[in-house]
Image (spheres, grey):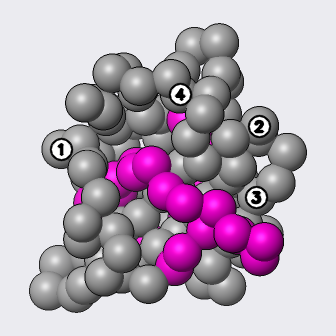
């Protein structure tokens, strides 16, 4: 059974940067496309970014495109999310999840990720 452990969150000022990590075990990591999703207080899950199993295809939501970079290390079984130019609206708990991958990328519907295994998440707070 897949286990996911997210880390790297924290409190950062607007315009700052953070790098999130997601350690994956219990499955052959290199076989699985991955996504980052987030949940702000009182809001539903929001898909943020996805990467295919080989790491050569990535997708981003419009809200983070140009600011966030997803990557993976299939030797270390770890997924990353580099977040630059953070904004207060990026404040949320961030989760990683295994995902499907279609011709145009991963599913982005929040209902899909409600059914996916997730770790405990890592809190990102962007505030001055």
Residue beneath label 2, please?
54
State the separation of the CA atoms marked 1 and 3: 24 Å
Residue beneath label 3, please?
58
Q: Is residue 88 magenta?
A: yes
Secondary structure of residue under mark 2? loop
Residue beneath label 1, please?
120
Q: Residue at x 67, y 52 (%)?
A: 51
**Figure disc tally:** 4
Q: Earlier in the sequence, mark 3 or mark 4?
A: 4
Q: Which mark is residue 31?
A: none
Image coordinates for residue 121, horizontal then vertical, percent? 25, 48
Image coordinates for residue 98, horizontal then vertical, percent? 45, 49
Q: What quarter of the picture does the N terminus occupy?
A: top left
Q: Residue at x 48, y 40 (%)?
A: 20
Tell me if mark 2 has few (under 14), some (14-19) or many (20+) residues whose alpha carbon lies within 10 angstroms of its own.
few
Residue beneath label 4, please?
29
């Amino acid at each position: 059974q897949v286990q996911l452990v997210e880390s790297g969150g924290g409190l950062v000022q607007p315009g700052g940067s953070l790098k999130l990590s997601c350690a994956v075990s219990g499955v052959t990591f290199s076989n699985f496309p991955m996504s980052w999703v987030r949940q702000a207080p009182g809001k539903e899950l929001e898909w943020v970014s996805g990467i295919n199993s080989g790491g050569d295809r990535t997708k981003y939501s419009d809200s983070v495109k140009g600011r966030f970079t997803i990557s993976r290390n299939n030797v270390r079984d770890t997924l990353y999310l580099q977040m630059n130019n953070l904004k207060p609206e990026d404040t949320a708990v961030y989760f990683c999840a295994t995902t499907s991958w279609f011709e145009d990328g991963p599913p982005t519907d929040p209902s899909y990720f409600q059914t996916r295994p997730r770790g405990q998440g890592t809190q990102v707070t962007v505030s001055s």
